[in-house]
Structures are given as structure tokens and as C-alpha cells.
Image: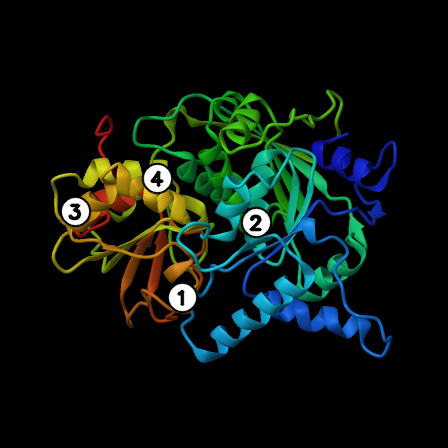
Amino acid sequence: MTVVEKILAKATGQKSVKAGDVLEPSVDVAMSHENAALVINQFNEVYQGTGIEPKVWNPDKIAIIFDHRVPAESSKTATNQKKIRDFVGANNIKRFHDIRSDEGGICHQILAEYGYIRPGFVVVGTDSHTTTHGAFGSFAFGIGATEMATVWTLGKVLNVEVPETIKVIVNGKFSSNVYPKDLILHLIGKISAQGANFKVLEFHGEVIKNMPMSGRLVLSNMAVEAGATAGIIPGDDETAFYLKEHGVTEKIEYVTPDADANYCQVVEINVDDLVPMLACPHTVDNVKPVTSFKGKHVDQIVIGSCTNGRIDDLEIAANILNGKKVAHGTRMLIFPASWNIYKDAMKKGYLETFASAGAVIMNPGCGCCLGVHQGALGDGEVALSTTNRNFKGRMGNPKAEVYLCSPAVAATSAISGEITEPAKGEL
């Protein structure tokens, strides 16, 4: 069996399952952000007319994190957040991360850094980038509000078809100016934005084995941009090390594929010759080398998000920007993925470096990525961003252009005010 088949077999109490089987797996973690307000509406409808007080199946397995609209940008958002707070209190949900500087951040970063995920878990979230948590060797995927209401009621997901798996083998060695973001953009460009529809991407190879968790989270996060249901990196010593560093004391058990596991496709990549890449407007699989757009003016640079807002991302950018200035005519926004990362970056001097360079440092959260508030683009403007999507209107304006890149490309381009490839060995 593949990793996902093993996970689903365990979650349904079966000895084995195969692609195409339809199951009802038990859920280990169910996550929502502000859209929990929609889930609450659906959840309450389940109990309407029954005379039974609505109560979630297991409050210890539910996580709710405010991140998409923080602080609230409207009275409607603030009212929904109040509604969620009341529900959390009524149901004794402990894994609740409000708008606080001692516990807040982007939902996918919070689940990771608080040690909520384990290899072999079934993780669902009302957010498409729930795939992020496949980096821990779990089966993590996005679901809708109605499906989540069912999970809150029954503790399992109904009618899950076991997906086929694409095996991705990555070998070689990154050049000094190439990063996991370049790898995942290259893969998406190679197989297309529909290339893994309803399938799992399972990552292997020496590059993956040597990659820290921060990079693995990038790969799993953007697996959904290739259409994948999930992006799984089997658990190993790096998984256990990360969880231990984040307070997990129990022994970690890995789920690995069988030697004779059945894959529907095998994709092999050697990164020796991989160069810094861009996802160009207006699709994430429109991938080209950074050098193809050398000299293109950029109005706004964005570094952060659930994809590339971690401490090593900020370190890469700060090292490039140290002692330099953001070009006039270009604005730069930094939004760390969590308050823990924010405070770590403050202690290490990265925030001072960014501020001295002319960047605007924003509170942790989803920020301008989704285009609801903070950092919207003007008509005809060009953004270069470390986020994960670039379809029309993604950052608030369908008349603007969004290019996706690594933190190194973003920081280097901020200095020149134009799309610029970072020099090898610069870091």
C-alpha cells in the first residue's frame, strides 16, 4: 500500500484498502479559521428540531484559528468572530487561537508549531491549503463547511474515495540560490495545475530526506496547486526532530509505503540544474525561469504567508536586505506566519533590518495573500510574492498581475525594484 492507503486503512479499521474504495475514516484533527462561522450554521442545522443541544463529537480534536481577517476589517467579520468565540466556549474547545500576540498566526503554521499533527493522522480543514500538514506524513486535505459540520457531529468524513498516488522522486543538490519553492513551482509547471487532480503527491528522494521541515511544508502546502488532494512526505527522523522541538514528548511512529506499493505515475526530478523560478500571471503552472523577466518593474513585494512566512524564509530575506534599501517606486510588505516567528525574527534583528530597508512589517496572518484586506493592488500593478496563488483578483484586483517566487527572489528584486535573480553564493 501507499502511505495514504495505509493511513485510511488504519482510520477505518481495515487490514488493507486500495485506490477507488469509498470509506468513512475517523478524523484526528479538524481545523477551521474564521469560516467556522459557516460551519456553526451548518452544525446547528443538524440538530434543528431534535430537542438535543448541539455538542461537538470531541472538542480535543477540533482546532479553530483566526488568521484570514485579523484584526477584523469590518463589523461583519468582528461579529462572526464573536459568534465563534461563544461557540468555542460553549463546547470547551481548547485548541482555539484568537487574535493574540502570544498564540496567534496562520492556521497552517499554528497546527505545525504547536505539535497538533502526527504521522498517520487524518487531518481535515475548511481551507484548501490544509494539504500543508502532509509534510508530517499525515493525510491532510481540505473540505467544505457542510462536510466539516458532519465531522463535528460524527467524528469522521463521509464518502472519501481512496485517491491514487503519484510518486515524486527528487534527487541532486540545490544551487545556493534555489529553494523548495523553486522545486514545487517547477513540479507544478511540469505536470500542470490539473496534473494531480484527485490524487496524492508522495515525495521521496535524497533532496526530500535532507530537507528541513520548513521546506517540506512548502511542498505539501502547494501540492494542491497541482490539483492534488494531498501532498505527503513520509515521516522520518526530521519529522520526529521537529515535533520534539515543538514540545511533543511521545514516541513518533512513521507510516511508510510498501516496497511494492502501486503508483499511478512516477515523476523524477534532478535539482542539480534547477534555477530560481517564477509562476507568472495568471496561473500557478505558468512557470518560467526568473531570468525570463529580468528587468520587469515590480510595484509590490510580499514576503510571508503559510507557504513562505517561516523564520528561515525571513532569515534569507534579511540577509539579502541587510544594509540595503527597497527601491523607490517599489513597496515591500513582510507578514510572518505566526507571532512566535514574529518575536523570533525581532530577537534576531530581522525585523529591524526590514524596517531599516523601508519594508512595512505587518501582523501575522494571511494578510494580502487572499486580497480581502491589507496590501491590495492598484489597477495595472505588478506584485512579486512568496504566496501560493496568482489567479486574477487573488490579491484584491483582477486588473493587477501577481508573480510567485522564493523569498530570495523577492528580497533581491526589492532592492532593484525589478524582477532579479539572486546571485549564487550570495547567502
Query: Quick one: label 2 or label 1, which is nearer the N terminus?
Result: 1
Distance from Cα at disc 2 to Cα at disc 4: 21 Å
Residue 260 image point, x, y percent: 76, 22
Q: Which residue is mark 1?
A: 71
Mark 4 element type: helix
Q: Nearer the viewer, mark 3 or mark 4?
A: 4
Q: From what the image shows, is residue 380 above or below residue 76?
A: above
Mark 1 element type: loop
Q: Which residue is mark 3?
A: 415
- Contact flag, marks 2 and 4 (Cβ < 8 Å): no
How many marks the image carries: the answer is: 4
User: In the rendered image, which quarter contains the C terminus?
Assistant: top left
- Contact flag, marks 2 and 1 (Cβ < 8 Å): no
Whether residue 304 can be seen here? yes
Distance from Cα at disc 2 to Cα at disc 1: 27 Å
Residue 270 image point, x, y percent: 46, 25
- Contact flag, marks 3 and 2 (Cβ < 8 Å): no
Distance from Cα at disc 3 to Cα at disc 2: 31 Å
Residue 327 image point, x, y percent: 13, 53
The residue type indicated by label 3 comes to Ile
Q: Nearer the viewer, mark 2 or mark 4?
A: 4
Q: Nearer the viewer, mark 1 or mark 4?
A: 1
Q: On the rendered structure, is 196 left or right of 25?
A: left
Q: Nearer the viewer, residue 381 or 97?
A: 97
Distance from Cα at disc 1 to Cα at disc 3: 30 Å
Residue 339 image point, x, y percent: 39, 49
Q: Which residue is mark 4?
A: 313
Distance from Cα at disc 1 to Cα at disc 4: 24 Å
The residue type indicated by label 4 comes to Asp
Q: Nearer the viewer, mark 2 or mark 1?
A: 1
- Identify which residue is drawn at 70% across, 32% down: 3
- Contact flag, marks 3 and 4 (Cβ < 8 Å): no
